[in-house]
Amino acid sequence: MTQSSLLLSPFQLGPTKLSNRMVMAPMTRSRAGEGSVASELAIEYYRQRASAGLIVTEGTQVSPRGVGYLGTPGIYTEAQGAGWRKITDAVHERGGKIFAQLWHVGRVSHPSFQPNGELPVAPSAVTPAGHARTLSGPQPHVEPRALAIDEIPETVAEFAAGARRALDAGFDGVEIHAANGYLIDQFLRNGTNVRTDEYGGSAENRVRFLREVVTAAAEVWSADRVGVRLSPLSPFNDMSDSDPFATFGAAASALDGFGLAYLHLVVPGSADPESESGQITAHLRERFRGPLMVNGGYTFDAAEAVVAAGRADLVSFGSSFLANPDLPDRFAQGSPLNAPNPATFYGGGAEGYTDYPALAAAVLA
Ligand code: PHB
């Protein structure tokens, strides 16, 4: 199986040589410490998973305003950058590659996370259904404050500063988190963007903020070290759009000209090309001609098949990488997988974080 596996074969991602086409998907683990600095345990967690062709870190907020959860790391202070440096060094020592995921949650934040208890910011004052997980327990989401048009350049600059800090911290690149109902996604979809200026209305206008963030990141890095993550059909965080094929088609077309490292799609169910997920994946692949990464419940066989069929170049794995630090070896050996334990996904210490076992050396030999 190993000899013929395309998934386990190397891939040239712009200037970055990946040892296989398996990516560790970004996953919030809520274990950062004081000052939103990645913890010492995080060094071991990422080191253990360095056999991924590429690691994309958990979302790391570019601004104190971008915080939406307890214990998520940031990338806007010197101490946070120094924390990340230990992680990039550990991954590189093991021969791995790692991109930082740049994140701003927008309306999904809560005043208790904000500087001076202010309202979260968003493209428009549209309140999400649901609750924020705050220090004092679940709190209903609040109506966010719509960003004034003259605040948008500052927000883009926060992403640029995060990109700069990621470069200084030794990452191989950055992924712009434009998925899952966070700030950039809030601009993209018309369920959350009801602006009447040049950042709202047409799909091209709603894509403008993403385009500006990507332009800024590509000025810090070269574009071939910048990836973008989108979730075109996901309702997570109370998201909706009246025409996802048109909205995300416009986004993919806008991203096509940059020469980006990759486009990363959260498309559960896309292993079936006939599903809506499969169809939107094909629709975006036609419009974005760079490397395409798919995510969402892929097994080894499904991942192998999607890559072999040319429908994607890379596949990212979330909970299976979380529970199996040596996932590429396990796929290569056809070995059983550890089951992820959702009770230890968020917060806590080593349990469910750095204590998932790798295969015994004897099994590998
Ligand atoms: C979460 O913490 O639930 C979460 C964070 C980032 C995502 C998705 C989910 O992109």
Image (cartoon, rainbow, N blue to C red):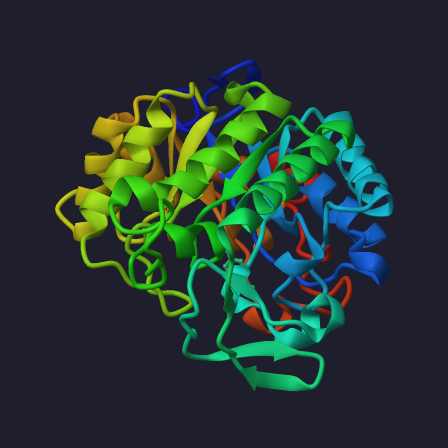
Q: Is residue 271 placed above or below 16 in the rendered structure?
A: below
Residue at image point 28% right, 30% down: 253
* Percent x, y of residue 67: 65, 61
Q: Is residue 235 placed above or below 100 in the rendered structure?
A: below
* Percent x, y of residue 353: 69, 58
Q: Is residue 181 left or right of residue 120?
A: left
* Percent x, y of residue 48: 70, 42
**Residue 189 visible in the picture:** yes
Q: Quadrant of the C terminus?
A: top right
Residue at image point 49% right, 55% down: 183
* Percent x, y of residue 44: 78, 46
Q: Is residue 34 left or right of residue 254?
A: right
Asked where in the image residue 95 lies, by quadrant, the reply is top right
105 and 154: which is toward the camera: 154
267 and 338: which is toward the camera: 267
**Residue 272 visible in the picture:** no
Q: In this view, does 26 lie to the left or right of 357?
A: left
Q: In this view, does 50 lie to the left or right of 3?
A: right
Residue at image point 64% right, 69% down: 344
305 and 86: which is toward the camera: 86
